[in-house]
Image: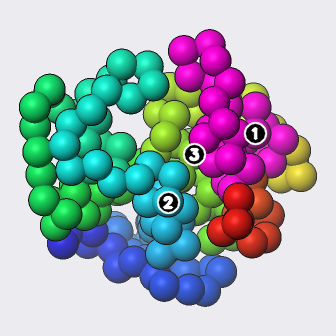
Amino acid sequence: MSTGGAKRQKSGPKHVAESAHDTGSYRMRVLSMEGISLIKKFEGCELESYQDSVGVWTIGYGHTKGIKEGMSITQDEANQMLEEELPEYEGYINDLVTVELEQCEYDALVAWVYNLGPTNLRESTLLKILNEGDKKGVPAQIKRWNKAGGQTLNGLVRRREAEALLFQNEPWYEV
């Protein structure tokens, strides 16, 4: 599986992996196995295409690009799709966040943007207060994003709680 040249980390709070496009001074952080576990838990894995809660065709672990009705994939293909997609979402956090992050904070934010997309991140109060250095305010901002199609969804409430806990380096598995 390709990881964009960076190696995924299993543990350790301050890991930073070199980017495949390393210029000598820029180092790119990557999602740890903890962050991947959160994404997999809350996205679930569907091997047949389906419409999500707002009607978007989806497959695998929340993959939406180019998905149509009637598609099917294997578990290996689902894992590969996720692995190939993660560098895009890691990049949004690496590029848009201007403060230093602990690995748990980074993982929570990548999981959040994987689910909500870069436009929501760019325009969010979450990003504004984070970049102002108000890390204590971030968990409450994470939790605000619990609606789809204007409806509060229990699955999103649970996911946001887990992301907020992970951001604070607290156990999230039981959420």
Q: Quadrant of residue 52?
A: top left
User: Which residue is label 2 attached to?
Assistant: 41
Kindly identify the residue that appears in the image at 56 percent across and 22 percent down: 148
* Boundaries of the magenta span: 138-163
Quarter placement of the N terminus? bottom left
Q: Which residue is mark 1?
A: 143
Q: CA gap, disc 3 to disc 1?
A: 10 Å
Indicate which disc, 1 or 2, sits on the residue closer to the N terminus: 2
Marks 1 and 2 sit apart, C-alpha to C-alpha, by 17 Å
Percent coordinates x, y for residue 82 in the rendering = 29, 57
* Farthest-out residue, top: 150
Q: Nearer the viewer, mark 2 or mark 3?
A: 2
How is the model colour-coded?
rainbow
Cα separation, mark 2 vs mark 3, equals 13 Å
Name which residue type carries label 3: Trp
Locate residue 43, reporting x and y percent.
44, 49
For the residue pair 155 and 166, the one nearer the viewer reads as 155
Q: Choose mark 1 or mark 2, whichever is in front.
A: 2
Q: Secondary structure at mark 1?
A: helix
Q: Quadrant of residue 107?
A: bottom right
Q: Residue visible at 65% across and 80% down?
A: 13
Q: Amino acid at mark 2?
A: Lys
Location of the C terminus by quadrant is bottom right
Question: Is residue 92 or residue 116 the one in the foreground?
Answer: 116
Lateral position of residue 173 relative to residue 35, left or right: right
Q: Is residue 72 visible?
A: yes
- Identify the main secondary structure in magenta: helix
Residue 72 highlighted magenta (yes or no): no
Residue marked by disc 3:
112
> Residue 54's spot in the image, x, y percent?
43, 19
Residue 72, above or below 108: above
On screen, residue 8 above or below 135? below
